[in-house]
Image (spheres, coloured by chain):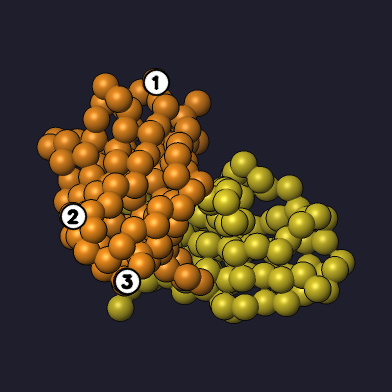
Chain colours: A orange, B yellow
Amino acid sequence: AQSVTQLDSQVPVFEEAPVELRCNYSSSVSVYLFWYVQYPNQGLQLLLKYLSGSTLVKGINGFEAEFNKSQTSFHLRKPSVHISDTAEYFCAVSVIYGGATNKLIFGTGTLLAVQP
Amino acid sequence: DGGITQSPKYLFRKEGQNVTLSCEQNLNHDAMYWYRQDPGQGLRLIYYSQIVNDFQKGDIAEGYSVSREKKESFPLTVTSAQKNPTAFYLCASSRTSGNSNEQFFGPGTRLTVL
């Protein structure tokens, strides 16, 4: 069965510093990978996704992630964070479930806390 | 604008009462989903539907029920059988064809049982 592990429940960082949020997954088959962001009391917004092709994926708000098949990782990075990046970030794996529908398996989330 | 709407944003319920959460989408998506979010546990799938008049249980369906009478609508009922219903509930939708696999989320409903 597929699973997603986000090792860090909270990552504090100073403004303009670089950040990496870690995500590892387990799967015996090919997967699609996603990062979503959630601001307080809101729904989830897609940051970026990996379906195929280049392993370096660029998303919105200056974020990028690299798919590493040998390490089964999909870490999210940003070279310089802003206060407005403070939010919870979820990594997710997509599997085919019950036919055509794509079920997402979510990690437990990482709270990025940007400090001035 | 295309998107997903959920109502109400905040909902209070007394113990023993059933309550229905609304989810509507105008993205013309076939698939719709309900998730429950609790602190430190990520999102857990309650029910999903691939097509009108059809739905399947997710990982934590006990104490919940759904219907899918229209493509645009996928209401979730939290019944009195749900032992710990206080949580943030998120609705999502996606296509069922192609390889995008992206799910689009609504703004959520926060349910509090008093």
Q: Nearer the viewer, mark 1 or mark 3?
A: 3
What residue is pinned by disc 1? A28
Quadrant assignment for the C terminus of chain B: bottom right
The amino acid beneath tag 2 is: Pro
A80 left or right of B62?
Answer: left
Residue highlighted by disc 2: A79
Measure the C-alpha gap from mark 1 to mark 3: 42 Å
Chain that bears disc 1: A
CB under 8 Å between discs 1 and 3: no
Which residue is situated farthest in the left direction here?
A: A54
Q: Residues within 10 Å of mark 2 (few under 14, many from 20)?
A: few
Image vertical order of residue A33 relative to residue B52, above or below? above
Tell me the residue at 76%/57% (across/down): B84
Give yes or no for contact between labels 2 and 3 (Cβ–Cβ under 8 Å): no
Query: Quick check: do tags 1 and 3 share a chain?
Result: yes
Report the amino acid beneath label 3: Pro
Identify the element where label 2 is drawn.
Answer: loop
Foreground tag (2 vs 3): 3
Give residue A68's position: percent from left, percent from top. Answer: 24, 30
> Mark 3 sits on what residue?
A116
Q: Residues within 10 Å of mark 1 (few under 14, many from 20)?
A: few
Which badge, 1 or 3, is on the more N-terminal residue? 1
Left of A109 or right of it: where is A80?
left
Residue A2 in sight:
yes
Q: Are marks 2 and 3 on the same chain?
A: yes
